[in-house]
Amino acid sequence: MIGREVRPITYPRGEVRASDFRVVEAGVREPRPGEVLVRNTWTSVDAALRLRLREEAPPGYFPAFPLDEPMDGIMTVGEVLESRADGFAPGDTVWHASGWRDYAVVEAGRQALGGVGTLTRLDLRLAPPQAHLGVLGGNGLTAYAGLFHVAGLRVGDVVWVSAAAGAVGSLVAQMAKIRGHRVIGSAGSDEKVRHLREELGLDAAFNYRAGPLPDLLREAAPDGVDVYFDNVGGDHLEAALGALRRAGRVAICGMISEYTAEEPPQGPGNLMLAVTKGLTIRGFRGSDHAHLLPEMRRQMGAWLRDGRLRCRETVIDGLAQAPVALAALLRGDNTGKTLVRIDEVPHRENALGAARHRG
Amino acid sequence: MIGREVRPITYPRGEVRASDFRVVEAGVREPRPGEVLVRNTWTSVDAALRLRLREEAPPGYFPAFPLDEPMDGIMTVGEVLESRADGFAPGDTVWHASGWRDYAVVEAGRQALGGVGTLTRLDLRLAPPQAHLGVLGGNGLTAYAGLFHVAGLRVGDVVWVSAAAGAVGSLVAQMAKIRGHRVIGSAGSDEKVRHLREELGLDAAFNYRAGPLPDLLREAAPDGVDVYFDNVGGDHLEAALGALRRAGRVAICGMISEYTAEEPPQGPGNLMLAVTKGLTIRGFRGSDHAHLLPEMRRQMGAWLRDGRLRCRETVIDGLAQAPVALAALLRGDNTGKTLVRIDEVPHRENALGAARHRG
C-alpha cells in the first residue's frame, strides 16, 4: 500500500511557505504484533508546530521535525484498517500522534506527546471525530488545564484571553463565561471580534490592531484584570502586566507573536510590576497535564451536549494543503480549530479556496 | 524638642546623590493618647527605597516619598522615651516605619508597610536591636517568604541566588544551605564571592562581572537549577530562564539592575522558555506575607542562636549619611544588611569613611 506523507524539506525563515514542504509517496508497511494500521481522516494544524520547524526546538519543547521525514507528534484522527493490538479492531475511530500523512502504523500503548498522543479509541457519542482534535483533544486539555489549574481561576476573577477566537482561546473564554466570570477577548480582525461578542457572548472584545493595546485593554477592562490567558506574548503580555490587579495571574500557553519572528524577541519591559503587584506568571504545555484528560473530556463533553460550548472549525480540504493551512493559521487567517480533512483519493488536492468555516 | 529629618528635595535621575536630600531640623510634638515618642537608634537602608524616590512609584508599590517631607515607610529601631499607648513603656526597644529621622511620634496599632512596619516591641533575647531591621525584620521576612512560600522550595532543588551577599540574598542562600540544598550564589565583586564561598559556605559562587552570565552560571550549575531567587532582574533573570529545569521556579524579590536605569528596561527575550519548560515566575514583596512574621522570627531566631545563620552588617554612622549609604548600596558597595546608626548628638556627622563591616 502506498500513502502520502507531508515532510518538511527546509526550515522556514520567517513565514511558513508551502515550498518548505514536499508531499512524498511512500510504502506503508504491515502492522506488527501490538500495532494497528490507521487510515487518517483528519489531522491537526497548530501554531506551536512552528516551534519544531527549526534546526533546534526551544529547550524543553518537543524535538524539531527532522527534514525529509514524516512529521511525528501531530495529533490525528483516523479509522483502524487492521489491528494486531489488543483493544483495537478494524472500524474503530482512534487518535494518535502520527499526523500529516494518509496512513500510519501505530504501536498501541506507546507514549506520544507526553501521553496525550498515545493511541486511543474515541467515544463518538460525545462529538464527531474531528472534535477530538480540538475541544476534546489537545486544545481542550490546554484550555482546561490552563484556566483552572495553571491560572487557578477564582470566583470573581476578571479574565482577559488573547487570540480569543483561536482553537484554545475560544474554549478558555467560553469556559470562563460558563463559570460566571467577566471575560474580555482580543483578536486580530473585526470579524473575529464580532464572533467573540455575538456568538461566544463575551462581555467585551477588541481588535488589537485598532489602537495602542494598553488603551484598548483599559477601555475593555477599566478596573483591570485578575487573569490573563496568553496565547500571543510580546506586547500583549506587557499590556497584561500593566492591567493585572494585585495577586493577578498569567497562564502562558504560547507566544504566537514570536513564532515567525526573525529577530530575537524583546521581553516585557515592565516585569517589575510582578514584584510590586505580587503577580504569578506560569508557562505550560497542555501535555504537562495529561492526567487531566479524562476529567476534561467529561466536563467538555457535558458542556458540548448542553450546547453551552460552541466550537467553530476552519477546515482545509486535502492533505497536501496542510502546510498552507499552517501558514494561514500563523497569519491569523482562521477562527476556532484549524483542521485538515484528508482526502480519500490520493492526489486529489483542493485549493485553499475550498477552506470554509463551519459554525 | 528638636530633631533632624532626612528629606528628599528632588527625585534623583539615575544614581542617587546626597544633594537630592537635605537634613532638616524640625520640632517634635508631644505624643497624644495612643501614641509613643521614640528616639530612633538604627534606621534601615534598602535598595527598594529607590522605587519611591520618583514622581510616581510603580503601580502596586508603596507610594512615592513626597518631596521635602520626612520619609514615611522606612523601618527603624528606637527606644521609647514617652508612652501614652497601652503596652509600651519608656525604655522599650521598638521597631516602626518612621525612619530616617532622630525622633518619631508613632501611633500604636497603626498599620504601616502592609502590617510589617506597625509599632512592635522587640525581643532582645533573640538578637541586638539592629538585627530586627535585617534578619529578624523585613529582610528576614522577604527571604523566608520568598524561598519557602513563593518559590516553594522542594527537597533536592538546586538554588541560584543573585545578589547573594546582600541583605536578603545572604539569608536566602544560607537558609537553602541549612535545608541541605545545593546553592549557587552570585555577586558583583571577588571579595563578595569569597565571602559567599568561605563564610556562607555556598557550593559555588561567581562574580557576574567576570564573563558572560550564561557561561558563568553553566559552570557553577552544569545541570541547571530548579529555583532562582531574583534580586537583580535584567540579564540575570534571562540567564536564569535559560538555566532552569522543567517545572523550575523564580521568586522575584527585586530588580536592582533596573532601579537607577534611565532607559526603560528590556525584559528577558527568552520568556518562551517558561512555556516549554513549564516555569513559574512569581513576584512578591515581603510585606505581602506579613502573617509569616512570627513563624519567620521563631525560625530565624533558632538558627541565629545555633550559630547557623551569619549576618554581616554594613554600618554607616550618622543620620545625615543615610542618602550616601543608599547610593553606596545601589552601587553594590555593601555586604549584608546596610544600616545607619543614628548618632545621639545631633549635628555630629561622620564621613562615609567611618563605615565598617561587622561580621
Image: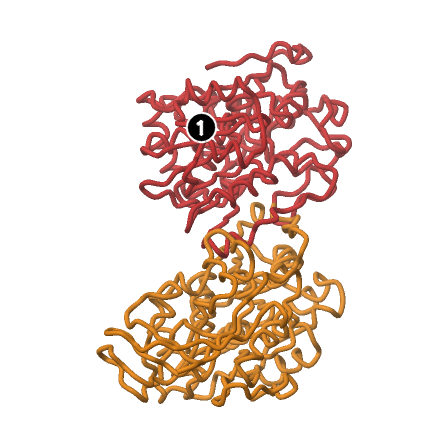
Chain colours: A orange, B red
Residue A359 in sight here: no
**Does B98 appear above or below A46?**
above
Residue at far left of view: A86
Residue at 32% from the left image edge and 80% from the top image edge: A121
For mark 1, does the 10 Å Cα neighbourhood hold few (<14), some (14 to 19), or many (20 or more) residues? many
- Count up the numbered dots: 1
Front one among A96 and A344: A344
In the figure, is residue B286 to the left or right of A36? right
Q: Nearer the viewer, residue B224 or A215?
A: B224
- Amino acid identity at mark 1: Val
The answer to whether any part of residue B219 appears in the image is yes
Picture quadrant where residue B200 is located: top left
For image coordinates 53% across by 27% down, the residue present is B187
Q: Quadrant of residue A332?
A: bottom right
Q: Name the one closer to the observer, A2 or B130.
A: A2
Q: Secondary structure at mark 1?
A: loop
Residue A172 screen position, x and y as percent: 51, 72
Residue B155 location in percent, x, y? 31, 41
In the displayed structure, B188 sits above or below A346; it is above
On-image quarter of the N terminus of chain B:
top right
Residue on which disc 1 sits? B135
From this view, report whether residue B324 is shown above or below residue B281: above
User: Is A17 situated above or below B91?
Assistant: below
Residue shown at 42% from the left, 18% from the top: B198
Residue occupying the point 45% across, 78% down: A133
Q: Position of residue A358 (x, y in %)?
A: 56, 88
Return the x and y of residue A322 as percentages of the image width and height. Answer: 56, 76
Pointer 1 chain: B
